[in-house]
Image: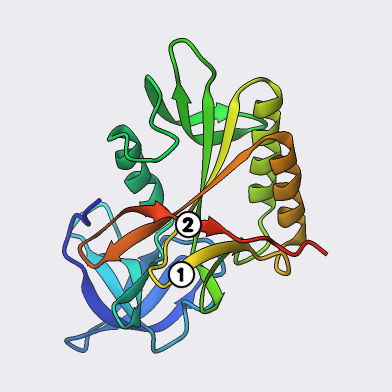
Amino acid sequence: MRFQTPLVPGILIRRYKRFLADVTLADGREVTAHCANPGSMMGLADPGTRIWLEPNDDPKKKLKFGWRLVEHGNGHFTGVDTGVPNRMLRAALEAREVQGLDDFDTLRAEVPYGENSRIDFLLSQDAGRDTYVEVKSVTLSRREGLAEFPDSVTKRGTKHLMELSEMVRAGHRGVMLYLVQRTDCENMTLAADIDPTYAQAWAAATTAGVETRVFDCRITPEGVTLGKPVKMKDTDLT
């Protein structure tokens, strides 16, 4: 998935009200950008961080920049827009590029299920069981080379795991798919110290038959594409 408009670099002044960020551009201008990420963004929103913005000239949008990437140096990036993974993944699914999720006849997104929830992707076969795919963007890393999820308590994420388990019990296939939106991580684990309830829900869902898939992403200021499978390391639930 390529960005619609070439990204421009800037230096983060501050992130505030979750969805706003003040940024100094290379030409010295200070602008306010939309931050499409409701999470804590732990380790990604420190003042002085070099980031990348996507400009827009849409008259319907009040803010003319969207925050897309954090640059870590040495050619590494983190994608911070939580809407990008689903758009990128949909393209990969339609192209049958996602290992283990390439055998389906119909793909639908945002299909209602569970208790007032919507599944990210529902893959259906004309003669076979449905596959419910829930997608989570992984951006936290507190140890070199290791990505972690979540970066804050996520009651919604726990609810999704429980609903995937119910789909499996009903005879369908449930897949929890984590997309590591960092280019500096080779493995992933759950941040049980941040949200032990989520980690326990993941363990219960795994026991119930929910599958876990983890993939990294290829990220540059030009775009984001699906990468290779990533190993899920054991989580300490004690």
Q: Residue at x 51, y 36 (%)?
A: 133
Front-lying residue, 39 or 174: 174
The residue at which mark 1 appears reads as: 185
Determine contact: label 2, label 1, CB under 8 Å. Answer: yes
Name the disc covering residue 230, or none. Answer: 2
- 108 shown above or below 54: above
Report the side of 74 relative to 134 (left or right). Answer: left
Q: Residue at x 63, y 33 (%)?
A: 116
- Quadrant of the rendered structure where residue 153 is? bottom right
Of labels 2 and 1, earlier in sequence is 1
Name the disc covering residue 36, or none. Answer: none
Q: Residue at x 20, y 85 (%)?
A: 26
- 151 shown above or below 177: below
- Quadrant of the rendered structure where residue 181 is? bottom left
Dot 1 lies on which element? strand
Dot 2 lies on which element? loop
Front-lying residue, 48 or 181: 181
Q: Amino acid at mark 1?
A: Cys
Q: Amino acid at mark 2?
A: Val
Report the side of 103 relative to 212 (left or right). Answer: left
* Position in image of residue 104 (x %, y %): 40, 23
Q: Residue at x 66, y 28 (%)?
A: 168
Mark 1 surroundings within 10 Å by alpha-carbon count, few (fewer than 14), some (14 through 19), many (20 or more) = many
Front-lying residue, 126 or 51: 126
The reply to whether residue 73 is visible in this rendering is yes
Front-lying residue, 12 or 142: 142
